[in-house]
Structures are given as structure tokens and as C-alpha cells.
Amino acid sequence: MSTYDNSPVVTVIGLGYVGLPLAVALAKHFPTHGFDVNPLRVDELRGKHDRTGEIGPERLGASTLKLGDDPAGCPPSDFYIITVPTPIDQENNPDLSIIEAASRTVGRMLKSARAAGRVPIVVYESTVYPGVTEDICGPILEHASGLACGSDFFLGYSPERINPGDREHTIDKITKVVAGQTAEVLDRIAALYEALTSGGVYRAASIKAAEAAKVIENAQRDINIAFMNEISQIFSHMDLSIWDVLKAANTKWNFLPFSPGLVGGHCIGVDPYYLSHRAKELGHNPRVILAGRSINDGMAEWVAKSLHQFRGERGSSVLMLGLTFKEDVPDLRNSKVADLISALEARGHQITVHDPQADPEEALDEYGIKISPAALSGTYDMVVLAVPHREYRTLGAAALRESLAPGGTLADLKGVLGADADWTL
């Protein structure tokens, strides 16, 4: 099947948090083209600006990665790697519309690859439930290309493991799980990823096994965090600090170091719904998974209720510090701080939001929330450290208290201020 020497041509579809680092890493070793449907995103990257903050301007400028937003401009390739988002809808059901659209686009690309004498492999990195790659995406590729899956082109899967803001577990250091439609396809995929990471590759038994591994990685974290959130709620009735309890428990060698908090973002707060959706289709009630999701999805409401009670159940002016889903990243996807803001507003509190990492236009478009860059200069009845960005950690509790009115409350959702906070989870 081999149709190339040691330099396969690669096209990466989707240049977000997952696709861009992957494409830049691949471009160090292979002729690589990055495609994104958003012309603004492509223009920014050509100008050496990555709004996600994952790839700096020097790395972008030094990379040989070719960029484009026109499918016709993508060269015939040996690999097409799809890294588009897989969100959930309002009913928490999997929304496969983006990955389906990307599959149709790649299907049209496959025609030129096959005409050039290549036998391309389409590798999916997007998070899905087991069966999506072969049972849903494969037929879409066939229909869009007019080619036969398993002879004219082949399928593969390698779950993404990008952790936004993490500079230690980067694409060039982590172990990549890989799976292929046949043994030879698996060899080709493994060789591709082995070239870009020192962490090596793990050959999964099947594409479905690799898909399943991805969803349970994040479902496991979700369930563990849900346990932390539940015991935090329990201990709040006992006048116990969850952070004091965790410090003691963490001295045991096999205690897992999870902590409570708002669970948002594009992975932990989403992926378990993919697995539970498929489980229910098969007639199984995924009780543990859905229980964890219920606790974590309700955490913002519980925090709002607790803060409201702490303030004597009266409305107050509130400075919300941080809106992104985690510290030190600009990623606003599935932010549970937005839920906390809504829950506090419903109880009569007036919220002012500050976040040095978030894009104000995106916050307004996505959540209808206005970010106030000068908010730290005001005074408020309550300051809530929701997302402990480095800017806030550098300021410290004493500086944050300068934004409090007399009798005000400094609340800390992540336990970074210790005893200097008036209220913590």
C-alpha cells in the first residue's frame, strides 16, 4: 500500500487548540498543510498570532506549515487528520455536525489524492463515542468522494490529548494512542506519530478501542472531581474546609490528588455525555457517569446559593475574577463561571467581570457577558476569585482586598488564597 518514501504529505483539518500544535509539530518532519474554514483564523496565523496562546509568534514564524481556508488549495495528501470540535447540544446530546461537515470536506479532497496515485488515510483526533469513525464518518467520506473505504482510502484514529495551557505534556512529549483499519494502515499511522513525539505510540487493538479510551480518560476525571464537589458540599455543613481535609488525605501514598471546582471546558464537561449517549442507545443506564455529570453541572448553582447565604441572602455588588474555563488560558468554551454569574444575578447580585486572558468580543458573543478591563479599580461588596489566572495570583489576597468595600467578602473557588480568603469551597 505504501505510496510515498519517508516524507508523506499531511493535511490537518481544523487549526484550534488541537490542530495547530499538531500541525506545527508535523511540519518539523513532513510537508504539512493546515486547513481551517475560518479565514480570520488563517489570516491571524499567517500574521504569527495564535489567539489560543498555544504557539508563540517565533514558532509560527519559523514553521514550514502551509496555511489555507480553501479546500481546493490543499495538496493531494497521504494523511488527512481531522481535529475539529465535537460539542454537545442544549440537551447534552452529541453534536456531530462539525465533524460530519469536516468529513464531507475531506471526502472531496480524497478525489484529488486518489487521482494523484495516493492511497490516503483519514485519521480522526476529535473526541467521539465508539463507532463514530467507522460507522458515521466512513460512509460520509465514501459518499462525498465516490471512493470505497477500505480500498481507495482507509481510516485511522488517534485521540487528542491536548491540555490547554499545559507546557509540560505537549504533543512532542506525550504518548499517542493510534489505531488503524488494517495492520498496514496502523503501521503507517504509528510511523507518522512516532516521528513527532518522544513519548512513543501505543497501538490500540481497534479504532473503537481507541475512541473508547479517549472518552473514559475524561469521564474518569469527571467522576473523581464530582466526588470532590460532593464531599465539599457535605463538609460545608460541618464547618470543615475541604482544602484542609485534602491536605491531610494527600499524605496517603495512593490517594488521588483531585480537587473540587467548576468543571467546564471542551473535554471533561463534554466527553462523558458522548459515552452516556451511546450507552443509552444500547439500553444501558450509565448511572455513575450521569451522577457525576449531574453533580458537576450543578456546582455553579450550589456555589451561588452558598455565596448568597454567606452574604445574608441580600443582593450585593460582585467583582467576578476570571471567566475562562481554567486558569492561564483564553479558552471560554463551556465556561461554568458564566453559569455562576447567571445564578448570582438571579438572586439579585450585580456582577462586574474581569478577565485578562479572555477575548471581550468572544465573551460578549458567546455569553452576553461584558468584560470590564478597569474593573479592579472599583469597590465591591464581594470579590470572587473564580479562575486564578497568574495575574491574580501575583496580586495576592492583600491587593485583591483593596477592591472590597467595608465589610466585604473575598471568596476563593480554587483554594489558592488559603486562610486569606473569607469564603472557600
Image: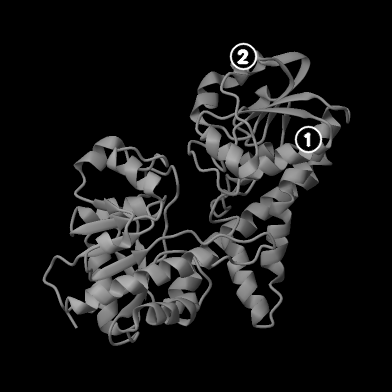
How many numbered badges does the structure rendering display? 2
Which disc is residue 332 wearing?
none
Q: Residue at x 35, y 63 (%)?
A: 176
Q: Residue at x 53, y 72 (%)?
A: 129
Looking at the image, residue 373 lies above or below residue 219: above
- Whole-percent x, y for residue 275 in the image: 59, 70
Q: Is residue 178 visible?
A: no
> Mark 1 highlights which residue?
345
Mark 1 belongs to which amino acid?
Answer: Glu
Left/right placement of residue 41 relative to residue 376 reads left
Looking at the image, residue 8 lies above or below residue 209: above
Q: Residue at x 55, y 48 (%)?
A: 333
Q: Give whichever of discs 2 and 1 has the lower sequence position.
A: 1
Say what secondary structure mark 1 lies in. Answer: helix
**Quarter of the image where one finds residue 55:** top left
Looking at the image, residue 17 lies above or below residue 239: below
Q: Nearer the viewer, residue 271 or 242?
A: 271
> Mark 2 highlights which residue?
377
Left/right placement of residue 165 relative to residue 192 reads right
Mark 2 belongs to which amino acid?
Answer: Ser
- Whole-percent x, y for residue 379 in the image: 70, 15
Q: Label 2, label 1: how many angstroms apart (C-alpha)?
A: 22 Å
Say what secondary structure mark 2 lies in. Answer: helix
Q: Residues within 10 Å of mark 1 (few under 14, many from 20)?
A: some
Q: Nearer the viewer, residue 419 or 13?
A: 13
Left/right placement of residue 417 relative to residue 380 reads left
Q: Is residue 88 visible?
A: yes
- Whole-percent x, y for residue 353 in the image: 64, 29
- Whole-percent x, y for residue 182 in the image: 31, 84
